[in-house]
Amino acid sequence: MGRLFGTDGIRGIPGKYPFTPVSVAEIADIAARVLLETGGQGRRPLVVMGRDTRGSGPALCRWLREGFAAAGCRTLDVGVVPTPAVSYLTPRLNALAGVVVSASHNPASFNGIKFFTGDGYKMSPEAEDAVEHRLSPEGQACRRRVPAAKSRAEDGSALAARYVDFLRSTFPAGLDLTGMRMVVDCAHGAAARIAPGIFSDLGAEVHALGCRPDGRNINSGCGALFPGRMQAEVRRLRADCGVSFDGDADRAIFADEKGALLDGDKLICLSALHLRRIGMLNADKVVLTVMSNFGLIRFLERQGISVVSVPVGDRNVTEAIEREDLSLGGESSGHIIFRSFAATGDGILTALQTLAALRETGGRLSSYRTMFKPTPQILENLTVADKIPLERLPRLRALVRRFERELRGEGRIFLRYSGTEPLLRIMIEAPSRANIENMARKLAAAYRDETGQ
């Protein structure tokens, strides 16, 4: 059995291991018991459950409920909500855990399971390891078969309104969005029922896209990974901006009034400068992952804002924020954590804080898009059948070292496997685009040659 947990929970294809009825129930049973043993004392034996709009979601939720019941836990089902809604609600209900059935930005054919601990944070690597061990053949003695008894979930759908009220409360009381025309793309996902209304209630003229989920169209040609239609609508309507969420609404990217994109790096830059201006950027530091652009790092440092660099994954960002008591961090993909408000990345919250900063300064979004000059970057994704550890590929590693010497400190090279998809990501930054394109081709060829994939 290969490792189940990636950088953001468990991902797979429903109907195939581990997303079968018995395996999902077993995962839920073991996860609940691990959390009860490792800090769940004093909390209600309650699991808060949400999902996105994938057609496979209800079945996975049903199988999870059976596992939680076997561990002695009740399940409160809040229905279709953004992933950060479960993170927000879990500690406020004094629940043992939260769980979200979602594969985030992946196509509808995939699904996923994300666990949150009682304080609203992603399950720790140590807890994931404990679950993995008990699921392994070596951990047979620590587990038992989940009984087939059916269980019913308690209806928590009304609690989605509590999360919406929280989001509204984060927008400064003296501001609104009156007079702003914006395009909002919800990726036919979890934001579809709530995001357009939030911006409309603040006074914006909202043109909604991706708000007709049918169980099969989540992230399909829309949302944060496919923002082209949103950009085109911004230009056609002469809107002030556009925002696109992914399927579970934990990330956001913007387009300015010209339809040009602002990714997570540019949104972090905008918020870092804004928070420092109002005295809310703790220690004048932000947390970025190794995938953030080299140009952003150099710009922030020139502004007197230090950067804490961490591996890819919003959990790594969160851990660094907590460790250093910081207020802002995120990823270029649009996962941004505003720690003064939330414990995890939240796309709608990110949009609200971006718009609040824009309103308070009175500028146009395009002026923030050009704040720093990105270092030319290429990101190549190779589909892989087997994620062979990179340390076992000496010829590839030697080629990386050679290219790093050639860059002479003026760029960076990162190779890593995706934690959620069967991909090897090759990212290179340097002043010469032609040079990095050539390097990326040679690294991809070297990987294929050495692995035979």
Image (cartoon, grey):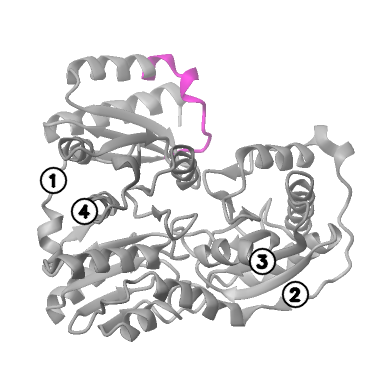
Q: In what quadrant of the picture does the C terminus appear? A: top left
Q: Is residue 359 above or below residue 308?
A: below
Q: Which residue is mark 3?
A: 48
| Quadrant assignment for the N terminus | top right
Residue span colored magenta: 383-396
| Nearer-N-terminus badge (3/2) | 3
Q: Which residue is mark 4?
A: 277
Of tags 4 and 2, which is closer to the observer?
4
Instruction: Say whether residue 60 is visible.
Output: no
Mark 1–mark 4 Cα distance, whole angstroms, equals: 18 Å
The amino acid sitting under disc 2 is Ala
Counting from the top left corner in percent of width and height, residue 343 is at 50, 55
Depth check, mark 3 against mark 4: the one in front is: 4
Q: CA distance from mark 3 to mark 2?
A: 10 Å
Report the Cα–Cα distance between label 1 and label 2. Answer: 50 Å
Q: Earlier in the sequence, mark 3 or mark 4?
A: 3
* Residue at 35% across, 23% down: 446
- Where residue 137 is drawn, which disc sits there? none
The residue type indicated by label 4 comes to Arg
Indicate which disc, 1 or 2, sits on the residue closer to the N terminus: 2
Q: Residue at x 32, y 76 (%)?
A: 173
Which residue corresponds to mark 2? 153
Q: Is residue 307 magenta?
A: no
Image spot of residue 429 (x, y percent): 22, 33
The reply to whether dot 4 and dot 2 touch (C-beta < 8 Å) is no
Q: Earlier in the sequence, mark 4 or mark 2?
A: 2
